[in-house]
Amino acid sequence: MKYKGKVHKFGAHIDTDAIIPARFLVTTDPKELGKHCMAGLDPNWIQRVEPGDFIVAGPNFGCGSSREHAPLAILGAGISLVIAHSFARIFYRNGFNMGLPLVEVGNIYEEIDEGDELEVDLECGVLKNLTKKKDYNIPKLPDFMVNLLKIGGLINYVQNKIKGQNR
């Protein structure tokens, strides 16, 4: 799974209420949630996002409440991948369950700047900063996680399992 996009960079400890403030939790529609993604930090942020862009963040991204709305809002905003120093545990699980690819890169995030163009190959474990012409080895995702993402998350996985379509 390869992704290519422009970076929107955030700092440390971005909580789920900043990702999607509670006042917008009246729906589970990703497109509607996406209109308000990151409104807790910057109400105009969504206007700068192009489909396929990346979020890059510091440690503990997605901390706070365990709302599944946060990864849905990110997906609905058109973000294809989130790269962070580290993720809050429950957000990490919710992200994959909703079909949102997440990559923990440790201190590599410090070398990525707002607006950089990146290419990420989750199966090979390579992050390329095309702007700075620098490549990094990142953790490869296990096959079962790649398959979960390819099918669009846990709900799709379970529905296909019930139908007998999953391997």
Image: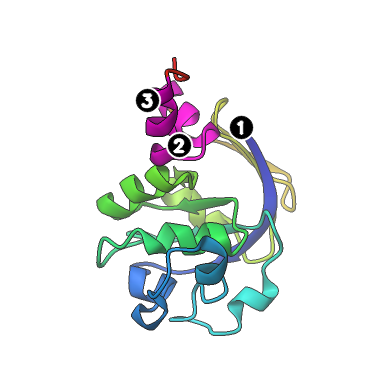
Marker disc for residue 34: none
**Residues shaded magenta:** 142-163
| Tag 3–tag 2 contact (CB < 8 Å) | no
- Of 147 and 64, the residue lying toward us: 147
Label total for image: 3
For label 2, count other residues whose C-alpha is less than 10 Å away and answer few (under 14), some (14-19) or many (20+): some
User: Magenta includes 146?
Assistant: yes
To which residue does mark 2 refer?
Answer: 156
Mark 1 vs mark 2, CA separation in Å: 18 Å
Image coordinates for residue 152, horizontal then vertical, percent: 51, 39
To which residue does mark 3 refer?
Answer: 162
Sequence order check, earlier mark of 1 and 2: 1
Residue drawn at x 35%, y 75% is: 17
To which residue does mark 1 refer?
Answer: 1
Image coordinates for residue 39, horizontal then vertical, percent: 49, 80
Report whether residue 115 is seen.
Answer: yes
Does residue 93 appear left or right of residue 49 in this picture? left
- Of 124 and 112, the residue lying toward us: 124
**Residue 142 vertical placement versus 152 (above, below):** above
